Amino acid sequence: MKTSLNRCQRCLRTTVWICFFECLFIALFKFVVGLTSGSKAMLGSALYSLTDLVSAFLLIVGLNVSGRPPDRGHPYGHGKVEHLVTLLISLIVLLGTVLLLLASTFSLYSVDLRPLHWIGIWASLASLCLSHIVYRLVVCAGKQTHSAAMTAHAKHVRLDSVSNIAVIVAIGAAEIGFQQVDPLIAILEAIHILFECSKMMHKAINQLMDGAIGRERLVEARAIVADHPSVKAIKAIKGKHSGRGLSLDIEIMFDGRSRIGECKATVRALEEAIKRGMAGVDAVNIRYRPYSGADTMSVST
């Protein structure tokens, strides 16, 4: 288990560096091709790839910090750095998208719409293939390590693929006489990116503010606890996002005749069972007290 986890962490770091150099190459490549072909959509896509590059750089910084073990100043670890990085990524995407939207709008009403060049289509196809390969790597690394920042970057890479398809359509339309399709496609692309960006920001802010986890995860934890024969009742279960993983706070009741040593041993066993049985849970706090028939159950699931 530990060997598998270490392998996933190494894969995660390797994938991040692959993303960084891929974004650097694609951004420069698109910028040169955009100037050569005269496509506003391609230049906008190059700008978006540039935000991908900054995103990958922030990802490197964020993962290096969030992977540090807990210390005296940060007893709960450094996992929230990932959500902060996700928020910064979203803000950078927002800035790049606004610039793209403004540039495309001005181009739409420009009287100087010169013909585009087919080289833009071939460049977009090559970029699309490369982006898809990197997207699959990022998705795999994000799922295996439960990394919020990697998941956000995967969406970012996918949107870059959408921009490549948009450029192909724009240049193809311009070649048959519809030059204004190029800036129009860029505007539609910007609107789509703004929508995705707003969702990423909402999720990051929710997790930074210790947003509650889904009901289905609480029900999953409750089933594990209720299955233990020593647990007489479950008073409450609460959960929140904590860095890469989830944090659970559970209050249970034992038979009033149980010894303290037995109760503590059961609590430790339950904590280990929850961490083994629930993916993504890295912190479990279980409180206990004696049970009497007069207690009223108030289970928050």
Image (cartoon, rainbow, N blue to C red):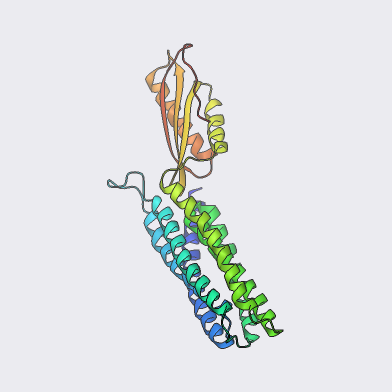
Is any part of residue 233 visible from this angle?
Answer: yes
Establish if 56 lies above or below 112.
Answer: above
What residue is rendered at 53% in x and 77% in y?
106
Q: Residue furthest left?
A: 72
Q: Is residue 3 left or right of residue 126?
A: left
- How many labels were placed on the picture? 0
Q: Is residue 161 visible?
A: no
Q: Left or right of 76: which side holds 181?
A: right
* Foreground residue among 92 and 115: 115
Where does the image place residue 84, in percent across and percent down from the top left?
40, 55
- The residue sitting at 47% across, 57% down in the picture is 149
Q: Residue 131: name its quadrant.
A: bottom right
Location of residue 231 in the rendering, given as x and y in whole percent from the top left corner: 50, 22
Residue 120 position within the rendered picture, expressed as x and y whole percent measured from the top left: 62, 82
Q: Is residue 33 above or below residue 9?
A: below
Q: Quadrant of residue 258?
A: top left
Q: Is residue 244 above or below residue 60?
A: above
Please give left or right for residue 187 compared with residue 57 in the image. Answer: right
Q: Position of residue 9 (x, y in %)?
A: 47, 57
